[in-house]
Amino acid sequence: MSISHHRTASGRPLRVAPAWVGAAGKVDHDHLLPVREAVWIWSVRRYARLSLWALPAAAVLDGWLTLGIDTPPGALPVALVADWLAAIAMIALAGLLAGTRTRRPAIAGLLIGLAGAMLTLPLAALPSGVAAEGLSLNPDQMHHAGTAAAAVTGAGWLLLGWSVFRSNWSTRPTAS
């Protein structure tokens, strides 16, 4: 099976709509490329596929923290790196789902998950049982705020997972 510029991977002829990549109102068409020349999408998809490896790396780091094993840099840098890797994986997953029929729930999951990560970030540096100075929250309420931030992040991951599940739903064999 060969892939050429005029055929799909299955060998069928490639049909491209006569659209142009660029600004809609530009008169000068010298700098615009036809859609079939948009080779940048291959690098974006390759980046997204490679970035999905950040998800197991984040899970390993979060598991390391959960076990309570002492780390040389401390728990805070490991937690921040784990959250950063999880955010990269969320962006990559939503990017790969952008071309599917579940792109809306994927984007909603990405935005909700990133909102939860942004809520978690200021609470990550606080030790347990300590309230932030200048806030009217006591330590118990700070714990509830951290739990709520984690729940928002989890809701984003659930939406992304549901999008992955539903994106392949139509290709499953049905029993007749």
Image: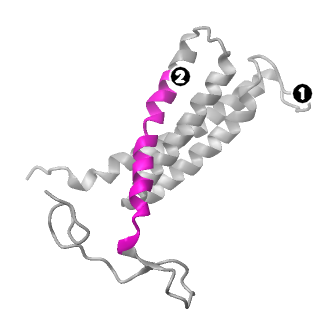
Numbered disc 2: secondary structure: helix
Q: Is residue 44 magenta?
A: yes
- Tell me what residue is drawn at x 68 percent, y 41 percent: 118
Residue beneath disc 1: 133
Give the magenta-colored segment's residue range: 36-60
Q: How is the image coloured?
A: one colour
Q: Disc 2 residue type? A: Leu
Q: Is residue 13 magenta?
A: no
How would you rate the neighbour count of disc 1 (Cα within 10 Å): few for under 14, some for 14-19, many for 20 or more?
few
> As displayed, is residue 25 above or below residue 130?
below
- Tell me what residue is drawn at x 81 percent, y 19 percent: 130
Return the x and y of residue 158 as percentages of the image width and height: 47, 41
Q: CA distance from mark 1 to mark 2?
A: 29 Å
* Residue in front for this viewpoint, 23 or 124: 23
Which dot marks residue 61? Answer: 2
- Tell me what residue is drawn at x 54 percent, y 83 percent: 24
> As displayed, is residue 131 above or below residue 161?
above
Secondary structure, magenta segment, majority class: helix
Numbered disc 1: secondary structure: loop
Return the x and y of residue 63 as percentages of the image width and height: 51, 19
Return the x and y of residue 91 as percentages of the image width and height: 52, 47
How would you rate the neighbour count of disc 2 (Cα within 10 Å): few for under 14, some for 14-19, many for 20 or more?
some
Q: Earlier in the sequence, mark 1 or mark 2?
A: 2
* Residue in front for this viewpoint, 167 or 35: 35
Q: Nearer the viewer, mark 1 or mark 2?
A: 2
* Image quadrant in which you'd find residue 18: bottom left
Residue at the limit of the structure toward the bottom, as seen here: 27
Return the x and y of residue 114 as percentages of the image width and height: 61, 45
* Residue in front for this viewpoint, 173 or 175: 173
Residue at the limit of the structure toward the front, as seen here: 30
Q: Quadrant of the N terminus?
A: bottom left
